[in-house]
Image (cartoon, grey):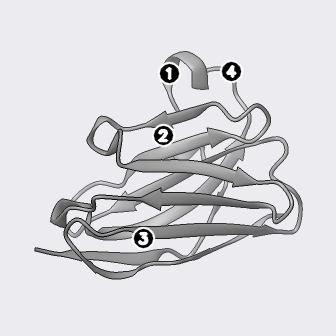
Amino acid sequence: QVQLVESGGGLVQAGGSLRLSCAASGRSFSSNIIGWFRQAPGKERECVAAIIWRGGSTYYVDSVKGRFTISRDSAKNTVNLQMNNLKPEDTAAYYCAARSYSSTFYFRGPGTEAEYDYWGQGTQVTVSS
């Protein structure tokens, strides 16, 4: 069993930055793909970034490329999401999630939310204009 806990959300002005962290307990991320999802009111949940723990390959949705960076910290067993140049449309609840490794990551992306087995409780990011 894996427990995921997100931290780092908050209120920031447009153009500002936030860093989200996802800490895992129970076991390590070593065999996993970890994704950051977000869900805004009235919208579907989408994966904005993901990383293969072993190897570090990453995925970004087009709307955040060049602004968000996902990274892993092996010593702390955490996955971070650095968000720069935030826009009001980035406002959402952000969740980290973990799934088993799959090579389909390389040609199909991080997979759907249904393929993720473990989820954190979420952290709110609000970007004011």
Q: Percent x, y for residue 118?
A: 67, 59
Task: Give the Cα separation between the discs numbered 1 and 3.
Answer: 28 Å
- Of tags 4 and 3, the one toward the viewer is 3
Outermost residue, top side: 107
Task: Give the Cα separation between the discs numbered 1 and 4.
Answer: 9 Å
Asked if residue 123 can be seen in this view, the reply is yes
Label 4 or label 2, whichever comes before in sequence order: 4
On screen, residue 34 versus residue 13, left or right, reads right
Residue 89 is drawn in which quadrant? Answer: bottom left
Numbered badge on residue 108: 1
Label 2 or label 3, whichever comes before in sequence order: 3
Contact (CB < 8 A) between labels 1 and 4? no
Numbered badge on residue 103: 4
On screen, residue 85 versus residue 34, left or right, reads left
* Type of the residue with mark 1: Arg
Task: Give the Cα separation between the discs numbered 2 and 1.
Answer: 10 Å
Numbered badge on residue 18: 3
Element at label 1: helix
- Report the residue at 35% width, 39% height from top: 65
- Report the residue at 80% width, 52% height from top: 29
Numbered badge on residue 61: none
Q: Which residue is mark 2?
A: 112
Q: Percent x, y for residue 74?
A: 83, 54
Residue 66 is drawn in which quadrant? Answer: top left
The relative height of residue 12 versus residue 75 in the rendered view (above or below) is below
Label 1 or label 4, whichever comes before in sequence order: 4
Task: Give the Cα separation between the discs numbered 2 and 3.
Answer: 25 Å
- Of tags 2 and 3, the one toward the viewer is 3
- Report the residue at 26% width, 69% height from top: 91
Label 4 or label 3, whichever comes before in sequence order: 3
